[in-house]
Image: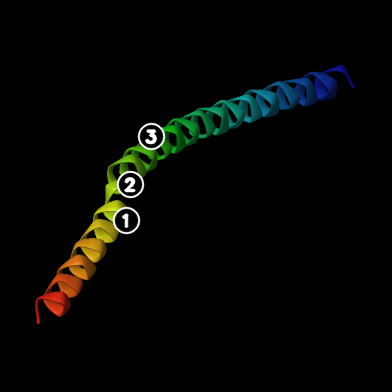
Amino acid sequence: MALELERLRGEVVAGFAALGGRLDTALQRTSQTEADIDKLEQRIELLERARWPLPSVAALVAVVGLGLSLYQLAAR
């Protein structure tokens, strides 16, 4: 009976050790994923900041085009 309990105790200890290893691996992957997400968020913010002048430039070109059209119309 005592030998059987000792064997079961050994299996439980080994099981907990294996489970602890799996949890460590999962925690490491989660930490790496969070770091990757942070990097991607920074890249997105940089891209969004670099993109802001495009609508302004398009509006400016449209206004200049309208102005030139009105100038040509008035010059006739």
**Mark 1 element type:** helix
For disc 1, the neighbor class at 10 Å (few under 14, some 14 to 19, many from 20) is few
Front residue of this view, candidates 73 and 51: 73
User: CB under 8 Å between callouts 2 and 1?
Assistant: yes
User: CB under 8 Å between callouts 2 and 3?
Assistant: no
* Residue 46 pos. (x, y %): 32, 38
Q: Which residue is mark 2?
A: 52
Q: CA distance from mark 2 to mark 1?
A: 7 Å
Q: Residue furthest bottom?
A: 76
Q: Residue 65 appears in which quarter of the rendering?
A: bottom left
User: Considering only order in the chain, which callout, 3 or 1, is on the residue closer to the N terminus?
Assistant: 3
The structure residue drawn at horizontal position 65% and vertical position 30%, both measured from the top left corner, is 19
* Residue 24 pos. (x, y %): 56, 25
The structure residue drawn at horizontal position 16% and vertical position 76%, both measured from the top left corner, is 74
Numbered disc in front, either 2 or 3: 2
In the image, what residue type sits under mark 1?
Pro
* Residue 30 pos. (x, y %): 53, 33
Front residue of this view, candidates 39 and 52: 52
The structure residue drawn at horizontal position 58% and vertical position 32%, both measured from the top left corner, is 22
Q: In this picture, is 26 found above or below 52?
A: above
Quadrant of the drawing holding the C terminus: bottom left
In the image, what residue type sits under mark 2?
Trp
Front residue of this view, candidates 9 and 63: 63
Q: Which residue is mark 3?
A: 42
For disc 2, the neighbor class at 10 Å (few under 14, some 14 to 19, many from 20) is few
